[in-house]
């Protein structure tokens, strides 16, 4: 049993977390005050509009229903197309129980109805939640259609198409004012309970599932269990609204179970604002008023409401709350912040804090982690074939090999993402093969990912907190305030300090530089308190100084927690590793010491290539020509929200010129590429392409003007073949703006893709995926190619192959390249622009930086 580390009075965490807790508390009080005021004012406001107390009760009831629905839609990311069924079941159950079991009573029928709804939702959810995405939504739709058919045809029980009346209230509640008061009290109680629920550990996990369910599973959450709880809670709250409605109208019918009513509930959530706590209630008010007044003018008012619903989805996805925010924005004080990573306080991390080290239950000389004879095939591709990997305690064990060797697949087999076709995997002698990811994590295996895998819409602090919370006993508590648990607060702050992310707590994870995301990804893995830590290319995308720091961090970490490391920085691997396993074609080629791997001729042949130094040393003649720049960037400023990322950037690129953008993580390099392509539009400044102004244009329009963009992480169309990826890249880009690239011409530069032409892109190795990403960017008509970290995570042999392809491409297109492999970037490029904190600090010929070591250290901080 893992006991949480108690927070001590001198822990600095309590003080640092206190403002966050206070803000959360103020937000909760504000929401409750707004809800109370609205419920008090509502009957008087509607009376002034000529509407009755029954309508006021309808508004409050609908607000309860849609706030229940929003547990799924807004907070968990599960879109239910059939939630009206629970409203109708609650109403029918209360009416039927009163009629047959408790005539004249309200309380027992209401409680019985909630039990019926909760039990039914538990059974239905256990089945429906086996499917995700659109299949989940379609199953909820099918459930509603089925229940509506039952209610419509089971005349003896439900009254069929006519329904049945005779539902009674307690005599004291026959006064509409008193019944509205009861509805208002119940509605306020629901608001209070939901506010507590969403602030609880369970509520925070539901948001994590919405943001990234896979990552939630890999930090230790059984997401199916949490989703089932959300489904039952959502259905029960909506069913409670149905109970209140049947007593309000004293009539039960099948109408609420209809598909149309479910659509109306979903529309209320979207129109009000699904990411706002009280937004759906505002949508309910809007719906009732719209129905009451427009239905007086036309019986087709639902058609108008449907069109309005579509309008909100297209023009204001944040609903009425978002509209209000935009209207009030000019009157709010504007604050400007620097880039997220510039605020962090990165110091010496030291040894891993004791609270994150899981000591073995028994001692022994055998390996901590052992994978024996593991195999995995994907269709006809044998990704891993009988591989053996053994990791000893307190060692740094490197797993290396060329792209496509099966390293990441082996990671996925060990960590529970895939079940091995054969073989066994043990952790401290306990078999973990075939376990679900959360069970593997709970057993003591933490992992990071090759492509950063975070809760992108949440803050850095929230990411770490969620991972820490996953091993706390209160992780399934539905009402305890998640931010008021001192042990979690203490561990979160300590881990932020250790990873070097302290100071950037409030930054959105997706807004961090790629290096910052790498650090955060590693922090999430460590927060699970692993017995063994699996790190998949933690140094990829990091600047040189940060690469050195993180490499030393991993080495220090391995003195307390054994680490299995996949990394392509061979020099650093050989310097840091205690033992090395080399894979090729899914099999283990060498397993031994660093010297064994370094001197093995087979390893050198399949993995190392000629080496980056040899590639960089070869002279590369420039193809730049022409006096007028093809690309001109002038005084560009770009913001991410309040963060000022680019500060007056200016640069040019001529025809056939290769320009390198260099600088530390968070300097603004990737943002500059996104600004050129139109993903992050500039707030001011001018970008022109051959005298055609492209600044401010959407990215599709910039792309059709001959700009190809290869994003960091590749962003291929998973499930589609190489041929289909290239076809989509070419589809809308045959415009005459640049050199025309047909399949045959692309394959001249990347001949390896011929063998993978009909293979799904997600089944390719990392190097082959990078080739597809570049080939897709070229397809069509292209004259400028933007490359963001094209050598990231690639073996030396594949890196050399891509380098030579880019060198040939300079004869065809201009290139702007961002890469942290300085030797390669400087050897390939004609000119360099160095960035720091979003500003240009140096620009000039790359040759100057290649040949002048002192200048290179001065400009690039090395």
Image (tube, rainbow, N blue to C red):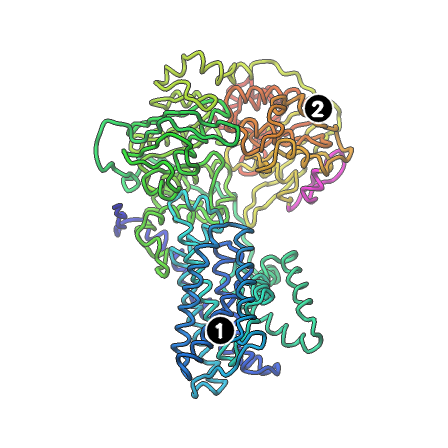
Q: Nearer the viewer, residue 519 or 88?
A: 88
Towards the viewer: 153 or 435? 153
Q: Is residue 209 magenta?
A: no
Horizontal side, residue 242 vs residue 300: left or right: left
Q: Position of residue 504 (x, y in %)?
A: 45, 45
Residue carrying label 2: 745
Which quarter of the picture shows residue 770? Answer: top right
Q: Residue at x 42, y 28 (%)?
A: 375
Q: Position of residue 785 (x, y in %)?
A: 66, 30
Asked if 377 appears above or below 184 in the picture, the reply is: above
Instruction: Check the image and report above or below for 102 versus 209.
Output: below
* Tag 1 secondary structure: helix
Residue 144 location, x and y as percent? 54, 63
**Residue found at the far right of this picture:** 736
Q: Nearer the viewer, residue 549 or 224?
A: 224
The boundaries of the magenta stretch are: 683-703
Q: Is residue 39 above or below residue 396?
A: below
């Amino acid at each position: 049993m893992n006991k949480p580390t108690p927070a001590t009075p001198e822990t600095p965490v309590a003080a640092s977390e206190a403002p966050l807790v206070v803000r959360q508390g103020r937000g909760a009080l504000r929401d409750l005050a707004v809800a109370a005021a609205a419920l008090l004012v509502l009957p008087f406001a509607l009376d002034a509009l000529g509407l009755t107390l029954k309508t006021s009760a309808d508004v409050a009831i609908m607000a309860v229903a849609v706030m229940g629905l929003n547990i799924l839609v807004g907070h968990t990311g599960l879109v239910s197309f059939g939630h009206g069924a629970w409203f109708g079941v609650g109403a029918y159950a209360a009416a039927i129980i009163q009629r047959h079991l408790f005539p004249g009573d309200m309380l027992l029928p209401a409680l019985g109805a909630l039990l019926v709804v909760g039990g039914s939702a538990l059974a239905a959810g256990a089945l429906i939640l086996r499917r995700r995405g659109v299949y989940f939504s379609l199953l909820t739709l099918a459930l509603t259609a089925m229940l509506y058919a039952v209610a419509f045809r089971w005349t003896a029980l439900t009254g069929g198409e006519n329904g049945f009346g005779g539902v009674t209230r307690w005599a004291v509640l026959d006064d509409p004012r008193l019944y509205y008061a009861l509805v208002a009290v119940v509605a306020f109680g629901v608001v209070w309970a939901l506010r507590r629920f969403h602030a609880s550990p369970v509520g925070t996990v539901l948001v994590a599932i919405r943001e990234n369910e896979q990552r939630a599973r890999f930090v230790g959450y059984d997401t199916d269990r949490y989703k089932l709880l959300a489904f039952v809670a959502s259905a029960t709250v909506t069913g409670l609204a149905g109970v209140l409605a049947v007593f309000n109208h004293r009539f039960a019918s099948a109408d609420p179970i209809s598909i149309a009513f479910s659509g109306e509930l979903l529309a209320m959530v979207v129109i009000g604002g699904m990411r706002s706590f009280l937004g759906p209630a505002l949508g309910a008010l809007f719906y009732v008023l719209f129905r009451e007044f427009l239905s007086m003018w036309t019986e087709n008012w639902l058609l108008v409401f449907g069109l309005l619903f579509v309008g909100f989805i297209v023009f204001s996805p944040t609903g009425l709350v978002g509209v209000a925010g935009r209207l009030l924005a000019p009157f709010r004080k504007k604050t400007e912040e620097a880039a997220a990573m510039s605020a962090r306080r990165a110091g010496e991390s030291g040894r891993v804090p004791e609270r994150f080290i899981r000591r073995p239950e028994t001692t022994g000389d055998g390996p901590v982690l052992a994978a024996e004879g593991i195999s995995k095939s994907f269709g006809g591709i044998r990704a891993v074939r009988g591989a053996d990997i053994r990791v000893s305690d307190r060692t740094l064990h490197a797993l290396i090999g060329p792209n496509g060797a099966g390293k990441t697949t082996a990671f996925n087999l060990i960590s529970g993402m895939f079940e091995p076709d054969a073989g066994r995997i043990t952790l401290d002698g306990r078999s973990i093969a075939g376990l679900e990811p959360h069970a593997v994590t709970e057993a003591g295996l933490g992992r990071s990912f090759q492509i950063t895998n975070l809760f992108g819409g949440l803050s850095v602090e929230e990411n770490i907190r969620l991972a820490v919370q996953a091993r706390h006993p209160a992780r399934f508590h539905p009402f305890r305030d998640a931010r008021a648990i001192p042990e979690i607060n203490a561990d979160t702050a300590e881990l932020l300090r250790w990873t070097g992310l302290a100071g950037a707590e409030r930054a959105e994870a997706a807004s961090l530089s790629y290096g910052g995301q790498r650090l955060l990804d590693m922090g999430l893995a460590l927060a699970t308190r692993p017995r063994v830590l699996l790190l998949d290319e933690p140094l990829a995308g990091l600047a040189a100084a940060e690469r050195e720091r993180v490499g030393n961090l991993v080495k220090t970490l391995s003195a307390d927690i054994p680490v299995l490391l996949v990394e392509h920085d061979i020099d650093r691997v050989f310097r840091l590793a205690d033992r090395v396993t080399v894979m090729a074609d899914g099999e283990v080629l060498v397993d031994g010491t660093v010297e064994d791997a370094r001197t093995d001729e087979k390893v050198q042949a399949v993995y190392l290539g000629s080496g980056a130094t040899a590639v960089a040393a070869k002279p590369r003649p420039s193809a730049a020509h022409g006096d007028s720049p093809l690309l001109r960037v002038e005084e560009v400023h770009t913001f991410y929200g309040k963060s000022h990322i680019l500060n007056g950037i200016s640069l040019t690129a001529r025809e056939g010129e290769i320009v390198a953008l260099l600088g530390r993580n968070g300097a603004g390099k990737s943002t500059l590429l996104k600004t050129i392509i139109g993903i992050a539009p500039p707030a001011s400044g001018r970008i022109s392409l051959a005298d055609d102004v492209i600044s401010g244009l959407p990215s599709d329009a910039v792309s059709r003007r001959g700009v190809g963009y290869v994003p960091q992480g590749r962003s291929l169309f998973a499930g589609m073949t190489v041929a289909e990826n290239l076809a989509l890249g070419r589809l809308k880009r045959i415009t005459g703006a640049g050199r025309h690239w047909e399949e045959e011409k692309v394959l001249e530069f990347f001949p390896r893709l011929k063998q993978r032409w009909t293979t799904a892109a997600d089944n390719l190795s990392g190097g082959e995926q990078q080739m597809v990403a570049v080939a897709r960017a070229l397809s069509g008509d292209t004259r400028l190619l933007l490359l963001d970290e094209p050598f990231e995570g690639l073996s030396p042999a594949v890196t050399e192959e891509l380098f030579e392809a880019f060198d040939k491409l300079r004869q065809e297109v201009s290139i702007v390249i961002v890469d942290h492999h300085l030797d390669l970037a400087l050897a390939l490029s004609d000119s360099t622009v160095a960035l720091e904190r979003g500003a240009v600090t140096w620009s000039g010929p790359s040759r100057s930086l290649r040949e002048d070591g002192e200048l290179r250290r001065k400009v690039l901080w090395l």
